[in-house]
Image: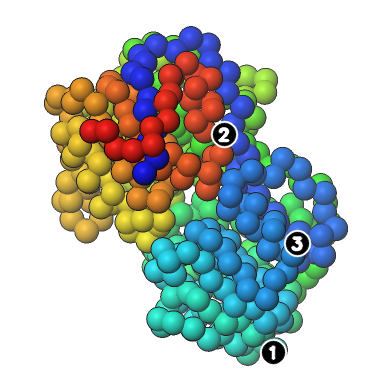
């Protein structure tokens, strides 16, 4: 097992960091581009493995779409294959085939798609055999499981002969990602309405355009956390915009409570250390990808914060609730379950001389726990897992002045 050892560092002086492009924006833009026969000019696409997988599959168009571990790619391309009347097998890694897709398949079937499970009902792999005719324009989808199901359906809606009237049932999770999808569609010429829990899209063509992908706010969150946990310093994060489509821009408001002053300047965002005022609670319903980062930050900074809106974390790359609980315990912190949707961070009181983090094949576990390097010697298992979303992450950690060493085996 490969390990990355990081030497403790507590101060950072005027670090300039070019952030990766948003894979969320990139993947949506690529699907829309494919639905307009590639007539758009897309720039600044993400280098993330998920996005590169999407590009490869759309360009080579194999009979089997193996998405590896890319959940967004699986969900978006399942809808894409159906509406374009292609016959494909959709599959991925063993973990990908344990992640549910039944809600999306049921919605596509109700529209008229022919889809068959090749293994366990409700999970990949799938055989998609097109959408020969539209059976209805009105469907319902639960809003509390994954916004990606909803986004997948919305992006194909303009190509449906009858259009779409989609009712989102119950609590809407990750609403900002649905808003991102609709706003991106609007930039490619689509007109829609969203009243209450109902989204309506009439049959209409996408319009070819130029689209530049913004830098990734999820990737930015790890640098907010690192500086919050450090003794002093400043970071300049390149490529972030004050008016963003990304819900994870909420990290600015969250980290203002945890000791980070954020100032937008030409070309990006300046982060500066300030006094921690305290974070008592936060609802992550619309920004679940920030939960791991903020939990680790609170555990390090001594914040007894209460988190809600974590339902979707159990069906991500790993069960992120379980993973957080296991790894926080390694430095005597805790994510305590108060109720099925309410958790409290119990911060660390004492810090071990060194901590080794298991990453559970989850890129965000590796990056979220990186700020521990401000308090102890840190060892990260399977560091290359970050390639899923942020291939240059460890290079930039080194550029920030944190010494690294690759170890080939467990020496603890």
Indicate left or right for 342 with 99 as reference: left
Q: Residue at x 69, y 58 (%)?
A: 56
Residue 300 drawn at (x, y percent):
26, 27
Which picture quadrant has residue 236? top right
Q: Residue at x 48, y 42 (%)?
A: 384
Indicate left or right for 230 with 111 as reference: left
Circle 2: element type:
loop
Q: Looking at the image, is 244 positioned above or below residue 349?
A: below
Label 3, label 2: how far apart the Cα atoms are: 24 Å
Quarter of the figure that contains the C terminus: top left
The residue beneath circle 1 is 133
Q: Which mark is residue 392?
A: 2
Circle 3: element type:
helix
Indicate left or right for 24 with 303 as reference: right
Residue 294 drawn at (x, y percent):
34, 36
Of mark 1 and mark 2, the one earlier in the sequence is: 1
In front here: 412 or 73?
412
Q: Looking at the image, is 234 positioned above or below residue 209?
A: above
Which picture quadrant has residue 293? top left
Using a 10 Å C-alpha cutoff, classify the residue at mark 1 as few (fewer than 14 neighbours), some (14 to 19) or many (20 or more).
Answer: some
The residue beneath circle 3 is 59
Q: Residue at x 48, y 74 (%)?
A: 124
Which picture quadrant has residue 161? bottom right
Residue 375 drawn at (x, y percent):
28, 21
Q: Residue at x 47, y 64 (%)?
A: 93
Q: Which mark is residue 159?
A: none
Using a 10 Å C-alpha cutoff, classify the residue at mark 2 as few (fewer than 14 neighbours), some (14 to 19) or many (20 or more).
Answer: some
Q: In front of the other: label 1 or label 2?
A: 2
Residue 265 appears in the picture as rendered: yes
Of mark 3 and mark 1, the one earlier in the sequence is: 3
């Amino acid at each position: 097992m490969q390990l990355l050892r990081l030497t403790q560092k507590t101060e950072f002086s005027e670090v300039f960091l070019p952030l990766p492009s948003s894979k969320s924006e990139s993947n949506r833009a690529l699907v829309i581009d494919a639905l307009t026969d590639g007539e758009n000019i897309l720039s600044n696409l993400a280098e993330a493995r998920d996005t590169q997988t999407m590009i490869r599959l759309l360009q080579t168009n194999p009979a089997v779409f193996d998405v590896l571990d890319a959940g967004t790619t699986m969900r978006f391309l399942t809808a894409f294959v159906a509406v374009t009347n292609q016959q494909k097998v959709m599959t991925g890694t063993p973990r990908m085939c344990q992640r549910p897709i039944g809600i999306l398949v049921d919605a596509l079937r109700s529209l008229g798609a022919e889809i068959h499970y090749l293994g366990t009902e409700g999970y990949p792999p799938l055989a998609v055999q097109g959408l020969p005719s539209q059976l209805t324009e009105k469907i319902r989808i639960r809003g509390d499981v994954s916004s990606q199901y909803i986004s997948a359906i919305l992006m194909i809606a303009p190509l449906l002969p009858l259009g779409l009237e989609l009712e989102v049932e119950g609590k809407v999770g990750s609403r900002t990602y649905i808003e991102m999808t609709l706003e991106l569609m609007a930039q490619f010429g689509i007109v829609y309405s969203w009243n209450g829990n109902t989204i309506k899209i009439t049959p209409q063509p996408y319009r070819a355009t130029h689209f530049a992908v913004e830098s990734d706010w999820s990737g930015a969150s790890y640098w907010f956390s690192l500086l919050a946990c450090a003794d002093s310093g400043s970071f300049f994060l390149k490529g972030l915009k004050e008016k963003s489509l990304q819900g994870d821009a909420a990290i600015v408001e969250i980290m203002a409570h945890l000791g980070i002053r954020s100032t937008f300047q030409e070309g990006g965002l300046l982060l500066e250390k300030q006094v921690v005022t305290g974070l008592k609670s936060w609802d992550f319903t619309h920004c679940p990808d920030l939960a791991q980062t903020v939990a680790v930050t609170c555990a390090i900074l001594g914040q007894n914060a209460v988190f809600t809106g974590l339902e979707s974390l159990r069906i991500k790359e790993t069960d992120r609730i379980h993973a957080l609980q296991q790894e926080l315990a390694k430095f005597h912190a805790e994510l305590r379950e108060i109720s099925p949707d309410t958790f409290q961070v119990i911060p660390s009181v004492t810090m071990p001389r060194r901590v080794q983090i298991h990453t559970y094949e989850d890129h965000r576990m590796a990056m979220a726990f990186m700020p521990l390097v401000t308090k102890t010697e840190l060892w990260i298992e399977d560091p290359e897992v970050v390639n899923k979303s942020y291939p240059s992450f460890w290079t930039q950690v080194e550029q920030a002045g944190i010494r690294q060493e690759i170890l080939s085996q467990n020496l603890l």
